[in-house]
Amino acid sequence: MSQYSLAEWTAKAAATRIPAHAWVNGQPVQALAGETTPCINPATGQVLAQIPDCKQADADAAVAIARQTFNSGVWSQMAPRERKLILVRWAELIEQHREEMALLECLDVGKPISDTYDIDVPSAVNTIRWTGEAIDKVYGEIAPTAHNTLALIQRLPLGVIATIVPWNFPLSTTAWKLAPALAAGNSVILKPDPKTPLTAIRLAELASEAGLPDGVLNVLPGDGVNLGKHLSLHPDIDGQTFTGSTAVGKLLMQYAGQSNLKRTFLELGGKSANIVFADADLDTAAEWAAVAGFYNCGQTCTAGTRLLIQDSIYDTFIEKVVAHSKAWKPGNPLDPATRMGAIIDQNQINTIQKYVQLGQQCGARLATGGNAINGLDGTLSGSYHEATLFADVDNQMTIAQEEIFGPVVSAIRFKDADDAIRIANDSRYGLAGGVWSRDISTALKVAQGVRTGTMGVNNYFGGDITVPFGGFGESGNGRDKSLHALNDYSELKTTWIEF
C-alpha cells in the first residue's frame, strides 16, 4: 500500500513529467502533420498535455519501420534467452519507476492512486517478467510419424502486430498484449486510446532503455477513425489484437476480411452474472458484489453488473449490498483513502445517466445512487458518478442486457441453480462471472453451466498471469495472459523430413 498522504501524492503529481510524444524507431516524435489532441485529467478536467494526433501517414511510416526491423532479425531471430533478459530488465525498470507509472495512470484515467500503485503497476511488472521468463522454456514438437520421417513443428512469430488498447486499464491491458507479442519475436505498433496514452508512451521509453532494439515497439496515439481503421486495413500488418467495445471489435473483424485476413483476436464487452445462493456467506458475498460492480467506477469489462440473488434472500441481500455501497463514494484519485475515482469523461457520464433513466422508465427500483456528480470538494471539476444499484430488474430490461460501463448494478431474482444458469446465459456476452454457495455441487454445477471465459467460485475477479483470460460469444475470441497467449502471436510451421 502507498505510504504517502494526499498532500504528498499531489506534490509528486505536480512534479511528474508528462511524456507528450509518439514513439517510433526508438525515438520520441511528433505527428507528421503536427496535429495534437488534449490529454485531460478526468478528475479535474484540466489538460495534462497536448499529445500527437497520429494519422494514416504516421501509421504507414511506423509499419514500414516495424516490417524492416522484423525482417532484419535483430529481434525476431534473437535467441529466446536473449529476448528474455531484455524483457525481464524491462519489468525491473517499470518496477523501479513504480511511483511515476502509478501517477501517470492515476492522472490519465482518474483511477485511485491506491489502485494504480498497488494493483496496476505490479500487474504490468508481473505480466512482463513472467512472460519473459517463460519464453525460453516453451518447446516445439516432433510429430509421431513413420520410422523413415521426421516432422518438426515450430512456433514462429507472426510478423508485425497492431495492438489497440482501451482507456479503462491502459497499463495492465497493454502489458497483457505487449508481453506475449514481443516475447514471440514480433514487431508491434501500439495504439493507445487517445484519452489515456501516457503509460503506453512511458512503457516504450523504458523498453528502449532495457535494450529493446529500435523499431520493435512503436507507439502511435490517435483516434479509431483516422488511425485505428487504417491500421486494421493495412496490408503489411500480420495480426491485430484489440480490447474494447464489441461494436468496434466487429468492425476490426470486417477490416481484416477486407484486407489481408490478418489474424484478429479480441477482448470485448461483458454483462457478467454474479450469482448468490441462499446458503452462501452472505456478508462476504455482499461485500464482493459491491466490489464487482463498483471497482474502477464499473468501467470494467468483467464487472459483475448482473447480480443474481436467490428468491429467499433477495430483499435481505439487497440491503447488505446497499450498506456496502456506501464505502464506494467518489473521491480525489490522489487520496490513498479513495476507492472510487472519476468517470473517464462527460460523454461517459451522459451514457451512464441515459441507462439510469431507462432503468427507472422500465420499472426497476433504484435502491441506491443514480446521480452524476459534477465536481468534488469545490476543487475537482471532473466527472463523477454515485455507486448505483437497481432492484426488481427483469433480465430482459435494457439495463440487464446492454453494457453500461459505469457503476450501475442490476439485481435479478432466481429460483434455483437451473434458473440461475438460464438467466446468466441469456446474454450475448460471456466474459466473466461468479457464484457464491457453500454447497460445492451447486457451485460447480453453476460454474460449469454458465458459458463464460472466467468464472469465480466464492470469489470475483479471481485469477493471475498463469491462467488465460478472454470471452465467449460477443465478448470476443483469443486469450490474454498465460502461455496460451503466445499462441495468438505465433504461427505453426511444419518441416517434413524423409530419409
Image (cartoon, grey):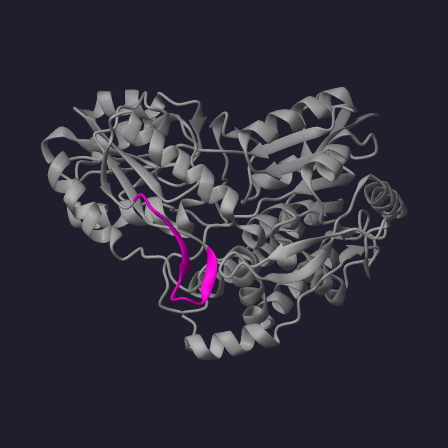
277 displayed left or right of 235 = left
Q: Residue at x 35, y 39 (%)?
A: 304
Q: Residue at x 27, y 44 (%)?
A: 289
Instruction: Work out whether 420 lies above or below 353.
Output: above
Quarter of the rendering occupied by the N terminus: bottom left
Task: Out of 390 and 175, give the one closest to the viewer.
Answer: 390
Instruction: Work out whether 447 lies above or below 77.
Output: above
The answer to if 376 sits in the magenta stretch is yes
Residue 251 horizontal/vertical position (percent): 65, 26
The answer to if 210 sits in the magenta stretch is no
Q: Is residue 406 in view? A: yes
Q: Residue at x 82, y 39 (%)?
A: 56
Instruction: Work out whether 112 lies above or below 422.
Output: below
Task: Out of 145 and 255, give the one closest to the viewer.
Answer: 255
Quarter of the rendering occupied by the C terminus: top right
Residue 116 horizontal/vertical position (percent): 49, 61
Residue 72 horizontal/vertical position (percent): 90, 47
Q: Which range of residues does the magenta coloring cover?
A: 370-382
363 displayed left or right of 474 = left
Location of residue 86 by image quarter:
bottom right
Location of residue 93 by image quarter:
bottom right
Residue 164 horizontal/vertical position (percent): 65, 41
Q: Is residue 185 in view? A: no
Task: Out of 266 and 13, give the one closest to the viewer.
Answer: 13
In this figure, what is the number of numbered marks?
0
Q: Main SS type for the magenta part?
A: strand
454 displayed left or right of 73 = left
